[in-house]
Image (cartoon, rainbow, N blue to C red):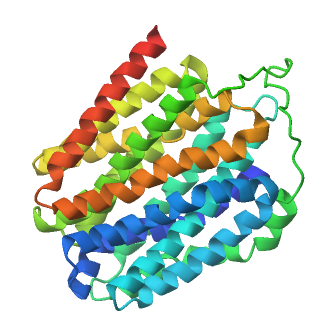
Amino acid sequence: MRRLSGTTLLAMLMFCNCFCLGAFNPLLPEIGRASALADWQLGVVAGAFGFARMLADVPTGALAGRWLGATLAAAPATLLVGVAVVGWATSFEVLVLGRILMGLAHTFTTVAGLTAILQDDARGRAPSVRLNTFEFAGMLGILGGLGVVGMLPGGWGWGLSLWVASLPLVVPLAMVSAYRRRFDKPHRQGDSPSAAGSTPRPYPARTPSIVWVMFGVGTVIALSWSSVSQFIIPLRGAREFQLDRAGVSQMLVIAQLVDLFALLPVGWLADRIGRVSVLGLVAAAMGLGTWGIGLGSLPFFMVGCAFFGFGMAGWMLPLGIIREHTALAVLAWRTGLYRVGVDAAIFLGPLVCGLLGEAHSGVFVGAVGAVALLAGGWLMWRGLR
């Protein structure tokens, strides 16, 4: 374990911890039927994950700034407890509690993992590629969870299916000491040299406007992702298009596969022609995909999943732009603050859809798609200018 690089350890943690996240979404219609939950209750269950992350982001950012290894090591243990609670849940309240624990654990993984990557300003490393590698590992884990759930016998209960799909959690649990040894080290509080070997760049005392713009873009992307993947695809697919568990998994897999294929090329392209222009392109694609999924017939629904997956390939680009304008001493805190907006959107997306009901939530996600499309057009214009 000592020979594994920090990037490999982080990617392994993200990969293993995301299996249960991918497995949960296709099971949502079965959870609703088994527990006789109304749409608003399903929205709360799905949104509790983002609610926990929203509350924990800033404290986790501060915690990761001081005890990075311990924060990473706590992630798989907390996630295991959350998965166990969800799988055993017999009531709406217990389901929400389990999802809150899962959200807390994923906050440990993402905020601490992103902090570790962004603090490492090693020479000659392409930051967008490294961030997208971390995201690639997570998407691969989600795809693995979707694949496992889709292949399990339909007669298995949703709780057992969730537990089986979450088995990769045992890998990071066995590697807790490796995370402590590798990441529990003091970090220098100044900025390290840039990749080109020049002197450290000066940072403004105030937060630049582009940072606030990235906060907004990240929030829109998260709102689209949570509404579509955690509510619209599972429930619209099952109810309107009569898809079973495997069929819903296949729709989600389309988005994940496109995301996986596009993720690293998008990062490579962003490091060469500019993150702002590439972010505009993927945001526009996400807007079109959200329209297709929320408002289209089954063929447009499927094409929308592909566009949506391409849009998700830009998930890490706002953070890369924020890093360009942020001193290392406040990076962990600002990363946590950025995640507050993102995770508030992850909470609100399925909650609003649940309150509107599956029959009326298409209008809401259509509006979200329009905002994403407009934001993408503006960013492309800014990048070209």
Tell me if 132 is positioned left or right of 372 in this view. Answer: right
Nearer-the-camera pick, 206 or 221: 206
Tell me if 339 is positioned left or right of 248 in this view. Answer: right
- Image position, residue 189 (x, y; %): 86, 40
Q: Residue, x 63% and y 62% (percent of image)?
A: 108
Tell me if 350 is positioned left or right of 49 in this view. Answer: left
In the image, residue 200 sits, relative to residue 348, either above or below, namely: above
Q: Residue, x 39% and y 59% (percent of image)?
A: 347
Tell me if 330 is positioned left or right of 249 in this view. Answer: right
Q: Residue furthest front?
A: 206
Q: Quadrant of residue 4?
A: bottom right
In the image, residue 101 sits, relative to residue 271, either above or below, namely: below
Nearer-the-camera pick, 259 or 235: 235
Residue 217 visible, this angle = yes
Nearer-the-camera pick, 297 or 368: 368
Q: Residue, x 55% and y 20% (percent of image)?
A: 274
Nearer-the-camera pick, 355 or 267: 355
Image quarter where the N terminus lies is bottom right
Q: Quadrant of residue 8?
A: bottom right
- Image position, residue 199 (x, y; %): 86, 18
- Image position, residue 333 (x, y; %): 68, 46
